[in-house]
């Protein structure tokens, strides 16, 4: 989350992370290989069990407005291995990517070939206690797509778009422990060093409108975009979180607390000696508290989350210096229902509220700024559930634009998944979603499991 400079004014852009930059309708499917496709486990002489799996994927996104310049042509190889011995296990997942479209992007420094450690950890599991040490993605929250307390893993700014079969979070180094105490479950997470988002390079199709203006200012000398101040000191720039949960008469309820650094940079404005404004990307500390709930009702689920982030760091008005603090409240509520395994409906309503002050100081309270809207998915299955077609997206009822995706997914046997669709952004170009209007696209993806 961050504040961004959009068309001459600063706005709190927390929803960028949970929309284009943060999984607007993902259900965390596809991060790992489906269990039924994992190679038959093989036991070694000591009684340990080893398994492996992987896939090849060709994901291609072409702009409707700029068909001659592909937005992404990412080719990916993922390999996963798992070893289990008694109560111990080790897991490794690695991606190797080749982004063909990088050569079409403006700017410099775009990597075409790169490798990513998706997960690499060892774990111990018992009836009363579990622990994990290594690099991992941990998701906290019950909201289907919008999770105000999903604060542990930063966004992959190279590829921030995520739909129902993708994941756009990066793993972090951590140690976690879970205790099962009667009907209660207590989980603690410790990050020995913070992991935050990079600044997208100039020319990346998903650079925000505010950052584009800073890049343009840097070119003509009217603005200066300073180097990113990253918290990278091991065992000093630490982050911690805890979650306490249990079931109350069919209601799964969890209480969450987190203390760490904002993932998305906040662009503080400072005056240089020459009088030229300097925008410094920073990652201040903050604390958050939240509660979430979920309950299954027949073939559906209702769920919700509430988060309170006191004194959350934001950029001040353009006439001020540095970074300010505002109280931020966020909630999401909704549910989904599966009609006879054929029709599926999912609707989530959300609202963010941030306290507002006079532009010249933080002493005078003048009210609350609200962002609100909903996410949705409507889909139907055909041909023995092998084909799924539908529409999903996000719409701001507060006037910040919308995103709609019409999609189709087809499963061929156990080895192939094909998908295609169109994604359209609407709204003013200074809106949280409308700013991506030029990125309207259609996509074709093929994935082969082995």
Image (cartoon, rainbow, N blue to C red):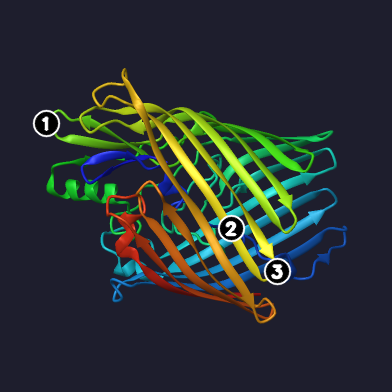
Q: Say few, some or many: other residues with alpha carbon within 10 Å of mark 3 (under 14 / 14 to 19 / 20 or more).
A: few
Res. 98 image quadrant: bottom left
Q: Position of residue 303 (x, y in %)?
A: 64, 46
Q: Position of residue 294 (x, y in %)?
A: 68, 45
Which residue is denoted by mark 3 in the rendering? Answer: 341
**Residue at point 53%, 39% (across, down):** 331
Q: Say few, some or many: other residues with alpha carbon within 10 Å of mark 1 (under 14 / 14 to 19 / 20 or more).
A: few
Between label 1 and label 3, give the one nearer the viewer: 3
Q: Position of residue 343 (x, y in %)?
A: 64, 68
Q: Upstream in the sequence, badge 1 or badge 3?
A: 1
Q: Is residue 68 left or right of residue 341?
A: left
Which residue is denoted by mark 2 in the rendering? Answer: 346
In the displayed structure, would residue 410 be above or below residue 282? below
Which residue is denoted by mark 1 in the rendering? Answer: 274
Residues at marks 1 and 3, CA–CA distance in whole angstroms: 65 Å
**Residue at point 13%, 44% (across, down):** 221
Q: Quadrant of the C terminus?
A: bottom right
Determine the residue located farthest toward the top in the rendered image: 363
In the displayed structure, would residue 67 be above or below residue 205? below
Q: Position of residue 96 (x, y in %)?
A: 52, 65
**Residue at point 46%, 53% (across, down):** 156
Q: Quadrant of the N terminus?
A: top left
Between label 2 and label 1, give the one nearer the viewer: 2
Res. 278 image quadrant: top left
Residues at marks 2 and 1, CA–CA distance in whole angstroms: 54 Å
Q: Upstream in the sequence, badge 2 or badge 3?
A: 3
Q: Is residue 424 visible?
A: yes
Q: Are marks 1 and 3 in contact (CB under 8 Å)?
A: no
Q: Nearer the viewer, residue 372 or 261?
A: 372
In the displayed structure, would residue 75 be above or below residue 322? below
């Amino acid at each position: 989350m961050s504040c961004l400079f959009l068309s001459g004014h600063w706005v709190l852009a927390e929803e960028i992370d949970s929309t284009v930059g943060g999984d607007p309708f993902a259900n965390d499917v596809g991060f790992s290989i489906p269990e039924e496709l994992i190679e038959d486990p093989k036991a070694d002489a000591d009684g340990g069990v080893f398994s492996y799996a992987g896939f090849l994927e060709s994901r291609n996104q072409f702009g409707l407005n700029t068909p001659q310049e592909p937005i992404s042509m990412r080719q990916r190889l993922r390999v996963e291995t798992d070893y289990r011995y008694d109560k111990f296990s080790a897991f490794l997942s690695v991606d190797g990517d080749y982004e063909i479209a990088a050569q079409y992007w403006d700017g410099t420094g775009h990597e075409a070939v790169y490798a990513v450690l998706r997960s690499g950890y060892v774990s111990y599991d018992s009836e009363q206690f579990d622990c994990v040490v290594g690099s991992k993605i941990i998701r906290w929250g019950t909201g289907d797509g919008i999770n105000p307390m999903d604060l542990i893993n930063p966004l992959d700014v190279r590829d921030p778009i995520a739909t129902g079969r993708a994941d756009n979070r990066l793993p972090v180094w951590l140690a976690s422990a879970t205790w099962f105490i009667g009907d209660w479950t207590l989980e603690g997470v410790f990050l020995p060093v913070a992991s935050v988002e990079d600044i997208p390079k100039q020319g990346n199709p998903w650079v925000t409108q505010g950052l584009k203006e800073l890049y343009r200012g840097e070119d003509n000398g009217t603005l200066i975009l300073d180097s990113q101040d990253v918290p990278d000191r091991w065992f000093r720039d630490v982050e911690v979180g805890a979650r306490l949960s249990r079931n109350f008469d069919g209601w799964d309820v969890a209480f969450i607390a987190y203390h760490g650094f904002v993932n998305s940079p906040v662009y503080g404005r400072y005056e240089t000696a020459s009088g030229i404004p300097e925008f410094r990307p920073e990652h201040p500390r903050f604390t958050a508290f939240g509660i979430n709930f979920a309950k299954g009702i027949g073939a559906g689920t209702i769920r919700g989350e509430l988060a309170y982030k006191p004194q959350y760091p934001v950029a001040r008005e353009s006439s001020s210096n540095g970074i300010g603090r505002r109280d931020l409240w966020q909630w999401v509520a909704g549910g989904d229902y599966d009609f006879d395994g054929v029709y599926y409906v999912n609707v989530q309503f959300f609202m963010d509220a941030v306290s507002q002050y006079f532009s010249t100081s933080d002493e005078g309270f003048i009210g609350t700024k609200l962002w609100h809207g909903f996410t949705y998915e409507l889909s139907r299955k055909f041909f023995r559930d092998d084909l799924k077609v539908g529409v999903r997206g996000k719409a701001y009822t507060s006037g910040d634009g919308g995103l709609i995706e019409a999609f189709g997914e087809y499963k061929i046997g156990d080895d192939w998944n094909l998908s295609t669709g169109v994604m359209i952004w609407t709204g003013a170009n200074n809106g949280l979603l409308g700013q991506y209007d030029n990125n309207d696209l259609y996509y074709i993806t093929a994935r082969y499991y082995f």
